[in-house]
Image (spheres, grey):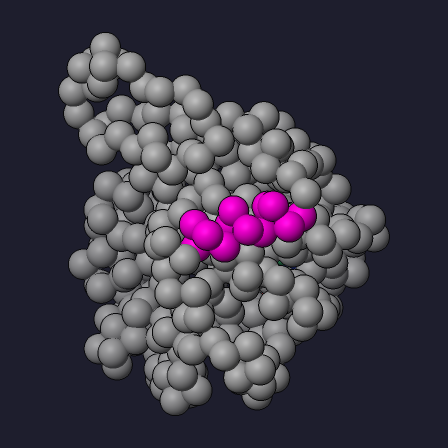
């Protein structure tokens, strides 16, 4: 379906000829130019937040935040060269390599997450992509976690043909695979897989009707134009992702991006607001980086339209706020967990 109403600042109207030309839902319409998104970033802060909050209220419960708990089911030793990642084998970080976890350990962790109030359990593996012999035990994990009444999410790297179908059959609800940054900046961060490889994996996920979770990392030294470029890629997808994680780079010693200039927190809030405006129906996830983020900035992110978080004291290998700290913050802000 063509949707032009998502862009309140875009005066361009799709003409009837174009509409006639669009015979199927497979037609992609660029709803947001990078310049239009940069213009959002440049609004006075109060105007930007007002626009984001207004749209947020049209499409979501403003006082509800979805919570997912992450578990690293296979840690470290990854063959890729993602410049931010402590799990890449080639960088010397403090991460200790751990093989694929046993099914019963994963189920135990999922039960704890459920008891703590998480509604989704996300299993992450430090792989370039799963080999068939890796995928089979993961399919069992997905099926068991699903049977516990939790939503399931996995992030296992690039998917080959046929793998998304197997994940769907196992009961996977969401697949996380981030574009990470704008195409123009991508090569400065990762060289072992292309932007197109990532888009191909997202297409495979979409084609079997698994919900798409895709976003990126802010604060890697990219320009504002490139932050807008990432959002344009996501918002202009034929169907934007259902879930959009916006990670603030967690700088880890030993990775190439360690020592990057810190991003101004207000610029991070602006990024959340621009994500909300360009993808009004998506869940925008305030992801990595909350451990070092003042609660006032987190509150601004929720006002700007963030409506999901990772919940539990660990992300994959780095720290996240304690569940009790988040409970206290939600209570202070009158936020309900979903
Ligand atoms: N190996 C798989 C992959 O790359 O798709 C799955 C796990 S990978 C760790 C998932 C995502 O975590 C990455 O795409 C990246 O966006 C995010 N991430 C990794 N390290 C990060 C860091 N130091 N700070 C913020 N986000 C990070
Ligand atoms: C996402 O966008 N952020 C999460 C999840 N998807 C897998 C991962 C953040 C990882 C932060 C670094 C670490 O803990 O290793
Ligand atoms: Fe490997 Fe994923 Fe880390 Fe890249 S982000 S190095 S693919 S674990």
Q: Is 163 placed above or below 225 here?
A: below
Bounds of the magenta span? 45-56
Query: In the shown orientation, is residue 180 left or right of residue 106?
Result: right
Give the total of numbered labels: 0
Whole-percent x and y of residue 21? 21, 13
Between residue 91 and residue 253, name the one nearer to us. Answer: 253
Q: Residue furthest top?
A: 17
Q: Quadrant of ligand 1?
A: bottom right
Magenta stretch, main secondary structure class: helix
Q: Is residue 32 above or below residue 222?
A: above
Asked if residue 51 is among those painted magenta in the image, a careful observer would answer: yes
Say if residue 108 shows up in the picture: no
Q: Position of 247 compared to 92: left or right? A: left
Foreground residue, 72 or 240?
A: 240
Residue 206: x and y in percent read 28, 43
In front here: 195 or 23?
23
Left or right side of 195 for 97: right
Please say if 272 is above or below 299.
above
- Quadrant placement of the C terminus: bottom left
Point 23% across, 14% down: residue: 16
Tell me what residue is drawn at x 44 percent, y 70 percent.
63
Q: Residue at x 62, y 32 (%)?
A: 38
Q: Residue at x 55, y 37 (%)?
A: 230
- Taking 156 as reference, is 81 left or right? right
Q: For residue 29, which quarter of the picture? A: top left
The percent coordinates of residue 305 (x first, y second) are 50, 57
Quarter containing the N terminus: top left
Residue 32 is at least partly visible in this image: yes
Q: Is residue 240 above or below residue 69?
A: above
Residue 65 in the image: x percent, y percent? 44, 69
């Amino acid at each position: 379906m063509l949707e032009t109403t998502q862009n309140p600042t875009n005066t361009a109207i799709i003409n009837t000829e174009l509409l006639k030309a669009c015979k199927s839902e497979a037609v992609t319409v660029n709803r947001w130019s990078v310049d239009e998104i940069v213009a959002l970033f440049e609004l006075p802060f109060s105007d930007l937040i007002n626009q984001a909050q207004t749209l947020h209220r049209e499409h979501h419960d403003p006082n509800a935040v979805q919570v997912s708990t992450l578990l690293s089911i296979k840690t470290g030793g990854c063959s890729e060269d993602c410049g931010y990642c402590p799990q890449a084998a080639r960088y010397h970080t403090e991460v200790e390599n751990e093989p694929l976890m046993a099914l019963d350990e994963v189920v135990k962790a999922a039960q704890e997450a459920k008891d703590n109030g998480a509604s989704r359990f996300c299993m992450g593996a430090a792989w370039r992509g799963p080999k068939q012999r890796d995928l089979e035990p993961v399919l069992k994990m997905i099926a068991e976690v699903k049977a516990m009444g939790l939503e399931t999410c996995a992030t296992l790297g690039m998917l080959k043909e046929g793998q998304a179908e197997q994940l769907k059959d196992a009961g996977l609800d969401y697949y996380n695979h981030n574009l990470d940054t704008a195409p123009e900046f991508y090569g400065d961060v990762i060289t072992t897989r292309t932007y197109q490889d990532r888009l191909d994996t997202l297409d495979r996920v979409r084609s079997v009707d698994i919900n798409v979770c895709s976003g990126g990392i802010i604060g890697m030294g990219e320009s504002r134009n490139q932050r807008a470029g990432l959002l344009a890629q996501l918002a202009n997808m034929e169907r934007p992702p259902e879930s959009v994680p916006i990670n603030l780079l967690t700088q880890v010693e030993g990775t190439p991006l360690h020592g990057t200039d810190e991003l101004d927190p207000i610029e991070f809030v602006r990024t959340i607001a621009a994500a909300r405006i360009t993808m009004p129906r998506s869940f925008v996830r305030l992801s990595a980086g909350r451990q070092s983020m003042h609660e006032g900035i987190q509150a601004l992110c929720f006002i700007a339209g963030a409506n999901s978080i990772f919940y539990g004291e660990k992300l994959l290998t780095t720290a996240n706020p304690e569940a009790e700290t988040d409970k206290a913050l939600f209570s202070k802000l009158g936020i309900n967990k979903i």
